[in-house]
Amino acid sequence: MRVLNGDPQQSVEVLRGLINSHPDFIEAYLNLGAVYRSQKRFPEAVENYRQALKLDPANADILLSLGTALVADSQPKEAIAVQKRYIALKPRDFQGYAWLGRAYKDLAEYQQAASALNEAFTLNGHDYDVCYNLGVVLTHLGNLADAAEKLERAKLLAPETADARYQLANVLRRLGRAKKAAAEMEAFENLKLQEAQRLRGIHYHNKGDELLSAGEFEQAAGEYRQALALDPKNPRLHYNLSLAFAKLGDAEAQEQELKKAIQFDPNLAPAYCRLGQLYHRRANLKEAEQALQTAIEIDPELSGAQECVASLPATPKGSP
């Protein structure tokens, strides 16, 4: 289930209501667990996955969801038991072995972790997490050459991720490859600076959202502008800034930001919907219909788009 209108709390309330009225509704527990996990509320996610598993104890998807949530909730021993049950049902799925290896790694049981992660790597050698965690485990076991190979692969799979470069730099240094180690450490430091900048952008973004909700539209626009200075191609930032401009009555600026949001995310249905509604108010009916129909094609359940299309005047027969 997607988060309703981008609002996790609304989703939680709807799903809780479903569970109260239909306590045997497995999908409601699964979806609620997924929403909680997206919010990093791992104990609540675990509890809902457990409830779903009580209703269907042999469901592999529930076992995988519960096992991963247990790892995230720092319950590796419980996760191991669950992932073994999942592997018994899905022995050819690398994910079971990957999460089993993660759980053993968290317990510092590196031989068992290496065994599970090697099996995951055999099944899927193109997964970043598998390669990264196997590299880390092999480093702990002193198998530095193999560790460097796996960490190098992880780096290539996710070049923007700093952790693999840091681990690789330390392994290369231990292998006596000082020049290469220095280059990887420099890359790691650059990526961490970029990450710090991204986190500053998130801070401004979140502050803008708070101010927008509080009706402080001018201040919200200022926060979004600061976030965009750090992350100028973020479609959600452009969309949220358009909402602030709409509240401030600046239709021209709203239109510009909506078009930028669509430029950077052509599948952002709410941006098309808002743009269509803006054109509708201006009586630009052809442009309004095009934007609103695009919104509906992307998301047929999008609130507001269907109603706005229905309010458009019918196109006379024979019109181009």
Image (cartoon, helix red, strand yellow):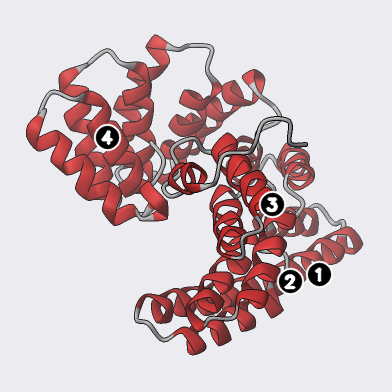
* Image x and y of residue 9, in percent: 28, 56
Residue 216 sits in quarter: bottom left
Which residue is located at x 58 percent, y 64 percent? 239
Assess whether mark 1 and mark 2 are in contact (beta carbons under 8 angstroms). yes
How many other residues sit within 10 Å of disc 3, few (<14), some (14-19) or many (≥20)? some
Query: To which residue does mark 4 refer?
Result: 78
Whichever of callouts 4 and 3 sits on the residue coming sooner in the sequence is: 4
- Secondary structure of residue under mark 1: helix
Assess whether mark 2 and mark 3 are in contact (beta carbons under 8 angstroms). no
Whichever of callouts 3 and 2 sits on the residue coming sooner in the sequence is: 2
Relative vertical location of residue 42 with respect to residue 259 in this rendering, above or below: above
Q: Is residue 267 visible?
A: no
Which residue is located at x 40 percent, y 51 percent? 5
Which residue is located at x 62 percent, y 72 percent? 254
- Secondary structure of residue under mark 2: helix
Mark 4 to mark 3: distance in Å?
A: 56 Å
Mark 3 to mark 2: distance in Å?
A: 47 Å
| Residue nearest the viewer, comparing 225 with 78 | 225
Mark 4 to mark 2: distance in Å?
A: 36 Å
| Residue nearest the viewer, comparing 31 with 142 | 31
Query: To which residue does mark 2 refer?
Result: 189
Residue type at mark 3? Answer: Glu
Assess whether mark 1 and mark 3 are in contact (beta carbons under 8 angstroms). no
* Image x and y of residue 182, in percent: 84, 66
Query: To which residue does mark 1 refer?
Result: 186
Whichever of callouts 4 and 2 sits on the residue coming sooner in the sequence is: 4
Which residue occupies the extreme front position in the image? Answer: 317
* Image x and y of residue 305, in percent: 49, 46
How many other residues sit within 10 Å of disc 4, few (<14), some (14-19) or many (≥20)? some
Residue type at mark 4? Answer: Glu
Give the position of the C terminus as an image quadrant: top right
Query: To which residue does mark 3 refer?
Result: 287
